[in-house]
């Protein structure tokens, strides 16, 4: 597992908590997605992403969070909540229109009084994604950003074109 930008997590009774230390990027967004999807399969409806130690996020990481938020919204009582994003990360989420999908520092939450306790119980999660073909994951994350806010389509048009061509070329090479 990459410990450069670790993802750690904890499952409480009423919510699931995941923390990004360092930069949230295409390198660790797969661990975020995998863990959160497993939590949802196990019945989690509230997933909290702790960004207090996150130094910044790339579009893949934010697109991954948007995808999780969209899936949670389809579950009764489901929501993705953001804890302590800091001004820079908050602005990044808002600039891409993702603040409508997730609750950023909600006034009332089941975890508000448990932050310190939860952080003490976190364990590293996610496998080393270095051997994984990241292009399909990165493409999915960017398509999600475009679905979340139409303005993002223009922002990421070149990235989408490049990623779609890369994924298509790899599929053709594997035939």
Image (cartoon, rainbow, N blue to C red):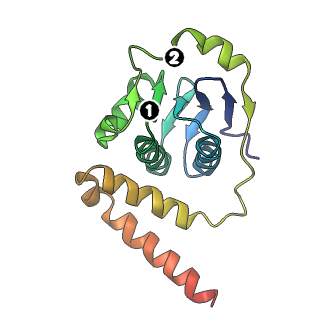
Q: How far apart are marks 1 and 2 (CA)?
A: 13 Å
- Where residue 91 sits in the image (x, y, percent)? 34, 31
The residue shown at (31%, 65%) is 157
Residue closest to the eye, 40 or 24: 40
Q: As displayed, is residue 80 above or below residue 146?
A: above
Numbered circle sitting on residue 66: none
The residue shown at (32%, 56%) is 146
Numbered circle sitting on residue 110: 2
The residue shown at (39%, 28%) is 103
Numbered disc in front, either 1 or 2: 1
User: Callout 1: helix, strand or loop?
Assistant: loop
Residue closest to the eye, 116 or 135: 116
The residue shown at (33%, 59%) is 156
Q: Residue furthest bottom?
A: 175
Mark earlier in primary sequence (1, 2): 1
Q: As displayed, is residue 18 above or below residue 142?
A: above
Quadrant in the picture for residue 77 = top left
- Where residue 169 sits in the image (x, y, percent)? 52, 83
Numbered circle sitting on residue 77: 1
- Where residue 60 sits in the image (x, y, percent)? 48, 51
Task: Classify mark 1: residues with Cα within 10 Å, few (<14), some (14-19) or many (20+).
Answer: few
User: Callout 2: helix, strand or loop?
Assistant: loop
* Count of picture labels: 2
């Amino acid at each position: 597992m990459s410990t450069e930008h670790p993802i750690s997590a904890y499952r409480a009774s009423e919510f699931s908590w995941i923390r990004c230390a360092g930069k949230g990027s295409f390198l660790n967004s797969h661990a975020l997605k995998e863990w959160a999807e497993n939590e949802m399969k196990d019945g989690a409806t509230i997933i909290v992403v702790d960004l207090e130690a996150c130094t910044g996020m790339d579009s893949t990481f934010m697109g991954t969070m948007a995808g999780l938020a969209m899936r949670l919204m389809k579950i009764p009582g489901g929501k993705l909540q953001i804890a302590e994003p800091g001004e820079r990360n908050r602005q990044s989420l808002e600039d891409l229109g993702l603040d409508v999908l997730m609750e950023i520092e909600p006034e009332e939450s089941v975890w508000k009084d448990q932050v310190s306790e939860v952080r003490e119980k976190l364990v590293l999660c996610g496998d080393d994604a270095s051997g994984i073909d990241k292009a399909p994951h990165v493409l999915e994350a960017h398509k999600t950003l475009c679905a979340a806010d139409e303005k993002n389509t223009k922002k990421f048009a070149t990235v989408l074109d490049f990623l779609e061509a890369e994924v298509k070329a790899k599929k053709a090479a594997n035939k």
